[in-house]
């Protein structure tokens, strides 16, 4: 065995480990007791804290060999414990029994593509192997039934709970299921918050890794009350690059900060328009505004999505583009966005009262 091959040198070398899809560092997740040496054979136990597909696992294994061979390792044996842990929510609240992590998708103002981002984020997380639900909290403008192509009212089980339908790999519940399509919800804030809590707690959610909450736009009383009363682990803020939208993003980030909800990152929607005829790129709403604001606020920039007619067409058909065109460039951006969210959630403070899942993949 090489003199360089010891737990300390291995731990130091593993700091260079990166997520195979998005390239962010994940080697900090290793602890001393995750490493065991048997001569020149290195046994590793790794708990990334999010789901990885077979391609990801192969990419990780190749990195382990590349990183440890210079130290004298002749073989690497990997025990990968994949799955999602429960993370800490706001003080005074506790997680929903069957939901590990609730993620709020919000926007400072309407019309920036928040609901479309929320549904494609949810479907992309499910494609990686997570169990995901979507809760449509936009009582005045529920759109998830249309975006997921689901009609009708949820079934009611013996406990008088709504049974959420499943579409495109995710479970969903929405106020839109409970009212007529053209009917308006003419309610004041307290009643909206009450209905939202009922949708959350009176839905028979299956065991979920993530519940994506499509929040109402803005930072008014309703959004603030939901942010205070729904046990969320973090938020994703959606914006467009234009200055007026970015101004409202600051308010949104401030609101979540005040209620002790971490902002997992900023998504810049409609970042560029690519002409479908000539391929010319035009920054209709401004250029890199979301990226600059993320840097200024020291938040993660999750990605920029183009203004593309295919997103609208697929949304109107009830087939999220990340599902209907999985290998397109736009879907790739959504998948990278979803992975960044999963990694950022995995780095949050854990809820130590709950046991970590033990789904083991050996290689």
Image (cartoon, grey):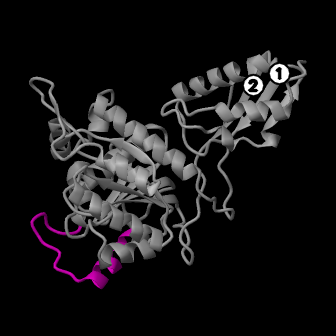
Between 171 and 237, the residue placed more toward the observer is: 237
Q: Can residue 285 be seen in this view?
A: yes
Q: Tell me the residue at 34%/68% (across/down).
A: 251
Check contact, mark 2 vs mark 1: CB within 8 A.
yes
Residue 36: which quarter of the image? top right
Q: Can residue 359 be seen in this view?
A: no
Q: In which quarter of the image is the C terminus?
A: top right
In percent of width and height, residue 172 lies at 34, 56
Number of numbered markers: 2
According to the image, label 2 marks what residue?
Answer: 77
In percent of width and height, residue 73 lies at 80, 19
Reply yes or no: does residue 85 show up in magenta.
no
Going from the N terminus, do you reach mark 2 or mark 1 first?
1
Q: Up-down: is 207 above or below 108?
A: above
Q: Tell me the residue at 29%/28% (across/down).
A: 328
In percent of width and height, residue 77 lies at 75, 25
Q: Dot 1, crowdedness within 10 Å: few (<14), some or many (≥20)?
A: some
Q: In this view, does 33 lie to the left or right of 91?
A: right
Q: In which quarter of the image is the N terminus?
A: top right
Instruction: Say which element carries label 2.
Output: strand
In percent of width and height, residue 237 lies at 36, 57
Instruction: Say which element carries label 1.
Output: strand
Reply yes or no: does residue 179 show up in magenta.
yes
Between 156 and 190, the residue placed more toward the observer is: 190
Q: Dot 2, crowdedness within 10 Å: few (<14), some or many (≥20)?
A: some
Q: Up-down: is 196 above or below 78?
A: below
- Which region is colored magenta? 178-200
Q: Tell me the residue at 48%/66% (across/down).
A: 261
According to the image, label 1 marks what residue?
Answer: 41
Residue 13: which quarter of the image? top right
């Amino acid at each position: 065995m090489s003199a360089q091959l010891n737990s300390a040198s291995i731990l130091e070398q593993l700091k260079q480990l990166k997520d195979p899809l998005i390239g962010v560092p994940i080697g900090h997740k290793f602890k001393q007791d995750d490493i065991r040496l048997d001569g020149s054979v290195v046994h590793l136990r790794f708990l990334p804290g999010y789901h990885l597909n077979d391609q990801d696992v192969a990419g990780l294994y190749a990195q382990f060999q590349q990183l440890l061979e210079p130290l004298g390792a002749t073989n690497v044996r990997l025990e990968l414990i994949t799955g999602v842990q429960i993370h800490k929510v706001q003080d005074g609240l506790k997680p929903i029994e069957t939901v590990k992590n609730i993620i709020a998708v919000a926007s400072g103002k309407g019309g920036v593509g928040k609901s479309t981002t929320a549904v494609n984020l949810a479907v992309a997380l499910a494609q990686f192997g997570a169990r995901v639900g979507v809760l449509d909290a936009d009582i005045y403008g529920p759109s998830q039934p249309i975006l997921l192509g689901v009609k009708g009212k949820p079934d009611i089980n013996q406990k008088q709970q709504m049974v959420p339908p499943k579409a495109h790999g995710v479970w969903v519940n929405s106020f839109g299921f409970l009212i007529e399509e053209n009917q308006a919800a003419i309610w004041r804030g307290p009643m909206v918050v009450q209905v939202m809590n009922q949708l959350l707690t009176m839905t028979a959610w299956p065991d979920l890794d993530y519940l994506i909450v499509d929040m109402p736009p803005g930072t008014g009383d309703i959004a603030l009350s939901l942010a205070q009363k729904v046990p969320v682990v973090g938020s994703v803020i959606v914006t467009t690059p234009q200055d007026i939208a970015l101004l409202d993003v600051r308010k949104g980030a401030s609101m979540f900060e005040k209620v002790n909800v971490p902002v997992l990152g900023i998504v810049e929607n409609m970042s560029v328009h690519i002409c479908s005829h000539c391929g010319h790129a035009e920054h209709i709403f401004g250029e890199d505004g979301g990226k600059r604001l993320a840097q200024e606020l020291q938040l993660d920039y999750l990605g920029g999505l183009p203004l593309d007619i295919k997103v609208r067409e697929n949304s109107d058909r009830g087939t999220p583009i990340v599902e209907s065109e999985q290998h397109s460039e736009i879907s790739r951006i959504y998948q990278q966005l979803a992975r960044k969210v999963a990694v950022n959630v995995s780095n949050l403070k854990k809820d130590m009262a709950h046991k970590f899942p033990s789904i083991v993949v050996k290689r």
